[in-house]
Amino acid sequence: MAQPTLGVLGAVVAWGHDGAELGLKGKRQRAVLARLVVARRRVVPVRRLVAELWAEPGPGAVGALQTFVGELRKALEPDRPPRAPAKLLVTEGPGYALRLAPDAVDAWRFEDAVAAAAKAPPEQARERLTEALALWRGPAYADFAHEEWARADRSRLAELRLRAVEERAGAQLALGLAAEAVPDLDAHVAEHPWREDAWRLLALALYRSARQGEALAVLRRAREALVDGLGVDPGPALRRLEADVLAQDPRLDEPPGAAARAARLWTRAAEAYDRAVAAGARARLESTVGLIRNLAVTGGDGLAAAREHRLPAIRAAEEFGDPVLTARVIGAYDVPAIWPRSDDPDQAAQIVAAAERTLAALPRTPAHTALRCRLLTTIALESRATPSTPTPEEPSPAAQEPRPAEPHGPEPETYGSAPDALLGKDLAPTPEQSAPTDPHHTRPEPRGSTHKPSPERAPIPEEPGAAEPHGTAPETHGSPHSADPTTAPATAEEPVPAELRNAPPPARGSARDGSAADPAAARARGRGSEPSRGYGGEPSKGGPGGAGSGEGRAGWAAREAEAIARRLDDPALLAFALNGVFVQSCGRAGLAGRRDEVGAELVGLAARYGLVTYEVLGHLIRMQARSALDDLPGADGHAAAVDALAERYELPLAGVFTRWYRAMRVAAGPDAGAAEAAYREAAAALAGSGMPGVERGLLPLALLSLRLRPGSFASAVPYLRADHDFGPYRRWVEPLLRLAAGRTGQARAALDALPEPPADLFYEALCCLQIAAALELGALPRLRQARDRLAPAAGQLAGAGSAVLTLGPVDAWLAAADRALG
């Protein structure tokens, strides 16, 4: 649900999600809203509100306040059904609180931007501060300038604004933009003549603009203002600057420090590029994609900006009608992905469709093999887990069958008509080319893994008519005119590349109907007499499809990309392809060992070839996998490695995941209160990180995981509230929510409607939620179904493969299910 936004940097106003101003009725109603904004999401008791908003509260003041609150709720949530609990202006304890997102109030956005700018390089600081200062429409809380309750916040925000003006000027000077800084600083000192740092910045800006005389005049004006107004002489910084200007000290000419010089170099190089490269040149588009890729790892704002510009860049490339250019633009975005849930599913589906169109049109020559690999990897990465059926709050594709990952090996294999059909006859490798000759072609065996590398090939079974897999991207992608581009069949307007057209139909595992995986049945469905082999050559536990019960085009794309990258012996390409393999290895329970192998190879490969972001990715994958395998000391080591690399190479988003991991570590201990506090702190750090696919629903699910264990449903009830936003996980929590509300019939219906969990890192956790509901309801068929899905993860920690939460040992859930099933 899109939230309204509030403005207090000027007159108090509210805007709807469409940008239209909401009709707030009268000054007193705006005062209630403003007072709750001042409280910053904290509860304000009714008595305090009445005392602060009425000079002489009468007997009807409380009733009037309740009326104002009711009208505000209607204005802020116009689509809220009757009698449904309010989600934005909530009643809690003795009073009211605003539960708005951190970016829903202009003052909060301003404060966050100023704080972020203080840690950013000059160019980013200048941009953020300019955007932040543009939020001001007048004095803060302008309607309530004389109200005591607004005084402290008004003063704090006003001081923060003055500081922002001066910090922006400092960033401009660091970038060599002295002349640009002069006008705003001149107005600033005229309005605030006692701010010495503002005078210093103005004089320095004038000096660097070749206006030495005016710089000295400014310093004299500063002296007069301070002496006449305050009776004090200028401080050491102003006196020293005056002496340096008179001496024409060379140090005044150049911004100090390596960072400032780098920023100035960036500005000059960008200006030169802008002059030298024509506006419509293809080189400009490719350079833009490189910037977008680098922007994505700079932090939350950078990631959101990269996501905003990525699809337009692809569309611009397609307009040239050159598939090679489009392939380079699509494939250049090799930003590591650690979370198998998309931040923007609609955009991801469009990127997949563009990659498939480009793959079909790309010339089939050896020179373009690496580009084909990048397109296939993009398809695998962008085809991440999606909800399987719509919920009241989360529209999603129709329910799909499970699609775990396929087995893969160190070189291309002969799957039906492949590799001729997959790669083109001229690209089919010879036996000599297929044999690995370099040690890094063989995936290392991580500690504790049960999967042993094997040179054996894995026959891929075929099952005509198998259902479309569930959890990641659908098997076909529709035209842009389809109602749902992620599920519509391919059309003539959307050519299907040969790689994907010849992929084997997805096989269906036996766990879907509630029975355990049957190796004999798997052998019967396969082409050979041996069971299918999974990652590293070990027999797969989930059916003939390898890393789970089957695969569709995305899993096939991941394996083919890996095979190509190994044959080309390109470390950076292989790291990118292995990321696709990781994303496509969450299709059933118990795959942590396989993901651990991917992470181990990434760490080794990236460390050897200086691929820092992929080294971080490898450690994060191993942190998740070792957590699932109940090796928390091992996971600790990988978390520490991530933090060290992130600090050294300025990768702030990596720390978001290690912070959640450490909260989970607290949750694994006995102190649930400390764990809850740690989770809330981690959620605050996640807010604004630019990762909605990670953020939404995570905190309520993590808090629930602290209390929910087999046989302990009662202790979890306080965390099962209908107004909690469980996001994409809501459907699997719904039976428990209904049980907590005493609606057994509705709980049973919700349980019966549950699809298979999506192919992401919460697969085991969502199975446990189904088991918990089935145990409470005595629903034995659904209990058996969830138990069998969870069984391959025996000996692991449920949910810990995410490295953000755990519902305890899988064995405890299996034992509880077995006792109930008899």
Image (tube, rainbow, N blue to C red):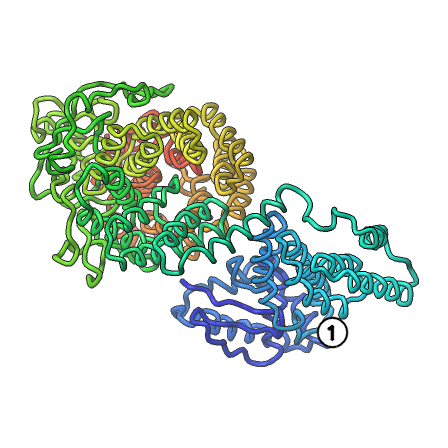
798 sits left or right of 258 in the view: left
Residue 377's spot in the image, x, y percent?
Answer: 28, 40
Under mark 1, the amino acid is: His
Q: Nearer the viewer, residue 562 or 518?
A: 562
Secondary structure found at label 1: loop
In the rendered image, the vertical position of residue 235 relative to residue 525, given as above or below:
below
699 sits left or right of 753 in the view: right
Name the image quarter holding the C terminus. Answer: top left
The structure residue drawn at horizontal position 83% and vertical position 63%, both measured from the top left corner, is: 222
Find disc 1 in the rendering and name its residue. Answer: 146
Q: Is residue 76 visible?
A: yes
Name the image quarter holding the N terminus. Answer: bottom left
217 sits left or right of 822 in the view: right
Residue 593's spot in the image, x, y percent?
Answer: 32, 26
Q: Is residue 780 visible?
A: no
Instruction: Bin the neighbour count of mark 1 within 10 Å (Cα to Cα): few under 14, some 14-19, many 20 and up.
Output: few
The structure residue drawn at horizontal position 25% and vertical position 48%, both measured from the top left corner, is: 324
